[in-house]
């Protein structure tokens, strides 16, 4: 699964800003991750400026994953042809599960030879969005939202004002810590109906 979240940049005088208020906007960056749904481990992570398009980072994240993938699952922000091309180039056997946007248009060959991306709006039109989510495996994407919540509670939601390479190192250390915590033990959840 791939997704991104914002992380605040916290400086030396950040506590003064919180105490006395500020007139300047808070600076923040985007943390993009590739998460293994089966294990909960972070396979890859990168940090970008806040205005970088999420979908543009998929190729960069996939370049760092060397084991074969079954699927790449992401939210609607990743419904772009570049995402499908990046996945197909690096992991041709992987299925891309991204909900189509409300303005999604089928390709010209959708009726005769639908592309993998065409099949999603077609399945939604036939059975509805909930049925598509259940059959496509999209529902596991909730795991990445839970991951970001745990990440921000355990690691924190801020970075120090450093040079970009030091911030990338800070994220790398946080990823190692988070993965090592999972190695120590992962809770077994049982659904009670």
Image: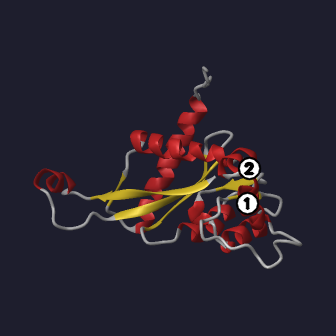
Q: Is 148 on the left or on the right of 14, as rendered? A: right
Q: Is 56 on the left or on the right of 163, as rendered? A: right
Report which quarter residue 189 is drawn in: top right
Q: Is mark 1 on a helix, strand or loop?
A: helix
Badge 2 density bin: few <14, some 14–19, many ≥20, Cα 10 Å: some
Report which quarter residue 17 is drawn in: bottom left
Report which quarter residue 84 is drawn in: bottom right
Q: In terms of depth relative to the viewer, which is nearer, 59 or 111?
A: 111
Q: Is 130 on the left or on the right of 162, as rendered? A: right
Q: How far from the left and from the top, in percent, is residue 164?
A: 42, 67
- CB atoms at circles 2 and 1 under 8 Å apart? yes
Tell me the residue at 76%/67% (across/down).
Answer: 118
Tell me the residue at 74%/53% (across/down).
Answer: 71
- Name of the residue lying farthest toward the right: 112
Q: How many labels does the image show?
A: 2
Q: Is 22 on the left or on the right of 34, as rendered? A: left
User: What residue is pinned by disc 1?
Assistant: 120
Badge 1 density bin: few <14, some 14–19, many ≥20, Cα 10 Å: many
Q: Distance between the residues labelled 2 and 1?
A: 9 Å
Q: How far from the left and from the top, in percent, is residue 45?
A: 55, 57
Instruction: Say which quadrant the C terminus sits in.
Output: top right
Q: Which of marks 2 and 1 is nearer the N terminus?
A: 1
> Is 140 above or below relative to 129?
above
> Is 64 above or below relative to 177?
below
Residue 136 tag number: 2
Residue 36 seen from this side: no
Q: How far from the left and from the top, in percent, is residue 155?
A: 41, 43
Residue 138 tag number: none
Residue 187 seen from this side: yes
Q: In terms of depth relative to the viewer, which is nearer, 43 or 119?
A: 119
Tell me the residue at 63%/66% (across/down).
Answer: 79
């Amino acid at each position: 699964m791939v997704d991104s979240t914002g992380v605040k940049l916290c400086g030396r005088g950040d506590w003064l800003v919180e105490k006395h208020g500020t007139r300047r906007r808070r600076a923040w960056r985007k943390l993009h991750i590739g998460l293994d749904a089966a294990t909960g481990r972070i396979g890859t992570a990168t940090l970008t400026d806040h205005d970088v398009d999420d979908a543009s980072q998929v190729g960069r994240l996939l370049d760092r994953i060397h084991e074969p993938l079954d699927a790449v699952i992401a939210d609607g922000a990743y419904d772009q042809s570049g995402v499908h091309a990046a996945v197909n180039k690096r992991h041709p056997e992987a299925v891309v599960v991204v909900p189509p946007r409300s303005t999604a248009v089928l390709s010209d060959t959708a009726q005769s030879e639908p592309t993998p991306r065409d099949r999603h709006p077609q399945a939604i039109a036939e059975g509805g969005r909930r049925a598509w989510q259940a059959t496509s495996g999209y529902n596991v994407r909730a795991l990445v939202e839970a991951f970001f919540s745990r990440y921000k509670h355990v690691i924190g939601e801020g970075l120090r004002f450093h040079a970009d390479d030091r911030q990338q190192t800070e994220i790398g250390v946080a990823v190692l810590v988070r993965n090592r915590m999972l190695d120590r033990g992962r809770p077994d959840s049982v659904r009670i109906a």
